[in-house]
Image (cartoon, coloured by chain):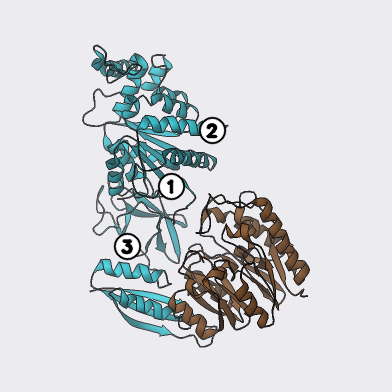
Amino acid sequence: MYSETVFLEGHIVDSLVLSKVLDLILLNGGLYEITGFTMGSTRTDISRAEIMVNAETRELLDNILHLIGQHGATRPAEEILLQPAPQEGVFPDGFYSTTNLESAIRVGETWISVQDTEMDCAIVVTHINDSTIAKCVPLHKITSGDQVVIGDRGVRVTPLARRDPGSVFSFMGSEVSSERPKELVIAGLAQAMRDAKRSGRKTLLVGGPAIIHTGAAKHLETIIKKGWIDVVFAGNALATHDIERALYGTSLGVELHTGQPITHGHEHHLRAINAIRAQGSIAAAVENGIVTKGIMHACVTNSVPFVLAGSIRDDGPLPDVVTDSVKAQDLMREHVKGVGIAIMIATTLHSVATGNLLPASVKTFCVDSDADTVIKLMDRGTHQAFGLVTDCEFFLKELAAQLDSLEK
Amino acid sequence: MSSEFTLLMCAPDAFDLKYEINSWMSIENRPDVTLAAKQWRELHRIISNDVGATVELVQQEPNAPDMVFTANAGLVVRENNDKRVLLSRFMHPERQVEVAPFRAWFEKHGYDCTEPPETVFYEGEGDSLWCGDTLVTGYLKRSDITSHNWIAEQLYCEVLPVELVDGRWYHLDTAFFSPSPGVAAYYPGAFDTYARDVIESHFETIKVVEEEALQFACNSVVLGKDIVMPSGCPRIGAELRERGFTVHTADMSEFLKAGGACKCLSLFI
């Protein structure tokens, strides 16, 4: 049997709120015991009840607590428990594992917001002068003795606000579907990007090489040049094929103008990587006039930072690729700060990796020709993601046009 | 003629339908803003000329199309000579922009402003109406029940929270009004069974039929023996006349498209 004590206060007798809460507990398969009750002594005094709620399973108990919480029956605010990390890179047993939702911890009489919201971390509490700071810290960044929150006592998680029905994100619902009026959805995204820009939030683009293969690079290049993208995450492949396109006009050896594979075209991507390695970096290749167009060129010339994270199947890789995945995660972690919108296009692994780092409050837009990518992203905890099942060339072309019309 | 009442209203200079945050709103069915302005002027004329109440005005902000619904600005309390307002904390971001201009107006006019705790939503007179010296408060659709405990602590009065269950009557003032102390006119279908029991056991009641509740019959402004209500509600109108009230009606068709009518457009100050 699982149990939890809740408090209910107000004019709970006259308003039948106490009766309703007790009925709800019983109707939903729980049991209750009133462990304390103070009746207001006049009509204007409020009454207080302390109710122990019992249920067979934790899930049932949580469900009941959620239902009665809407009617004011809430758990008492208890202070957090802390324990020091036993060694570098190890959380103490029973650590609180974070979600990507905005959270706060109870210290003394106040709630303190947890900074750097990220799922699958621990909360580390530090005291600087008179202030207490709480942060989400990933496993590899824990040092011995860090004060880590244990259990969920004194931790409050704020669910995502009820969706704003007027925005594209709620208009789309949270399901994945190809049955959507795409132009309307993309127009809504363009407006959301403009709103983010006005409020000083960044737009992050996460992209896969299909952007190049489908001939969509020129649209993305335009969007970056016009200042709509603040940071880019990708892998070796997107950058390589983008540079291959800039140097040879092909992507994976297929000529983008004609759609025909060309002789020895399959070597082009390796020759592109080799050319950049000779220069030392993509930025150097741009500065020296080797790369004169494309997505990476637009990033360099518009000072848009990018993180290229390596994978085990990479050719080369390009010198800018960060092959240590923990280092790459840390770099991405730095760049997601201040992001308001994340657009993920045609990449499963990079989308999931980025989703893991994003607070749930970031409007996350996933575009793929395969619905499975968005489903995977959501299954791995990025529940805020909205999916649009479509070809990335259509998507980027339309997005560029919608952003243009906003400018006009 | 009554001059004991003062209401805050907001001319619909920027009224429009730009989002959908209740089940009445549809971008496909936007109000005719010229007609809306005419309807608002007529409501203003009835309240100030026919009834004789004092009307103060707040300027509408261009980015706040629903600011015309001043009832949601907060709940004004007069304690002796002190003027105090419990400000709202709107549930929808679209309406949160209204808080600052309303607050500025109240501060300029000498009101002591109190904000609800950060963790609760509260939508002012839209969800809290006096019935005698009891404050009836609606919850679950917009305001949180915990906001009503906060009001009880602030005002030290009896607060009866009642649960709203139908999205068409999302604020208490869309389904409940009190023509006189101890009398409640309400549409039962908007409330859960506990709330209906509470209303029936505490007050003498007048039930509004669904057809007229859909015309926002309950969104009426009670100014002593004068009641200003939306047109199209003959049954409740006749009942109130029989009880000695003077009933004034105003065509509210364009504001109904945004889920509001006479009461939503006015706040007791």
Of mark 1 and mark 3, the one earlier in the sequence is 3
Front in this rendered view, residue B148 or B163: B163
Q: Could you say which disc has been placed on residue B44 in the image?
A: none
Question: Where does the N terminus of chain A fall, quadrant-wise?
Answer: bottom left
Camera-side mark, 2 or 3:
2
Q: Is residue A319 visible?
A: no
- The residue that mark 3 highlights is A152
Is A61 rendered above or below residue A193?
below
Which amino acid type corresponds to the residue marked 2 in the rendered image?
Ser
Label pair 2/3, CB-CB below 8 angstroms: no
Front in this rendered view, residue B186 or A343: B186
Q: Is residue B115 left or right of residue A312?
A: right
- The residue that mark 1 highlights is A169
Chain coloured brown here: B
Q: Chain of mark 3?
A: A
Q: CA distance from mark 1 to mark 3?
A: 31 Å
SS of the residue under disc 2: helix
Chain coloured cyan here: A
